Amino acid sequence: MEENQKFVLEHTQEVSNRKHILIVDDDLNTLKTLRYYLQDAYKVTVINSGKVAVDFLLKYTPDLILLDYMMPMYNGAAVLKIIKSREATRNIPVFFLTGQTDRTTVMECLSLKPAGYIIKPVAKDALLDKMAQALAK
């Protein structure tokens, strides 16, 4: 996507008992896939930019965040640091999403103390299991 086309791709303000998951990734196919996997069980918001996610979190508080680690401008590490610095968002579980499996990237991700780390692509059942376990805590 063009840099000037960063926006919230989908967010509904439905009143629901379902848990709310925010997915932040600069890859449109990943956003569509993860939304498809989760939409039957959760309220899902998809955003394609770290900056827009930070702005979104000023107004809304999801129950869990799936955050791409490698994004332009506001990468996952920068967004997580902002999330952890704010009283209203610091306790939201954040799972990094990444296609990177090298030891350096994994250790870098884990040093930021996310709730978890998910390697892309992820299978639907595995994702649903991780989300259910994290939200049950």
Image (tube, rainbow, N blue to C red):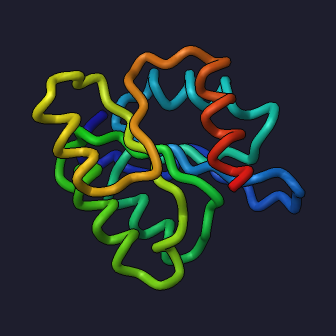
Image quarter of the C terminus: bottom right
Q: Nearer the viewer, residue 35 or 135?
A: 135
Q: Is residue 30 left or right of residue 46?
A: left
Q: Nearer the viewer, residue 120 or 34?
A: 120
Q: Position of residue 124 (x, y in %)?
A: 63, 18
Q: Nearer the viewer, residue 11 or 57?
A: 57
Q: Could you tell me which residue is drawn at 80 percent across and 36 percent down?
A: 41
Number of numbered discs on residues: 0
Q: Is residue 133 above or below residue 86?
A: above
Q: Is residue 7 left or right of residue 14?
A: left
Q: Nearer the viewer, residue 66 or 110?
A: 110
For this orientation, the residue located farthest to the bottom is 87
Q: Position of residue 96 (x, y in %)?
A: 38, 42
Q: Could you tell me which residue is drawn at 46 percent across and 73 percent down?
A: 90
Task: Locate residue 84: give its quadrant.
Answer: bottom left
Q: Is residue 92 above or below residue 95?
A: below
Image quarter of the N terminus: top left
Q: Is residue 30 above or below residue 1?
A: above
Q: Could you tell me which residue is drawn at 46 percent across and 51 percent down?
A: 115
Q: Position of residue 12 (x, y in %)?
A: 72, 54
Q: Position of residue 14 (x, y in %)?
A: 83, 58
Q: Could you tell me which residue is drawn at 28 percent across and 67 percent down?
A: 81
Q: Is residue 115 left or right of residue 22?
A: left
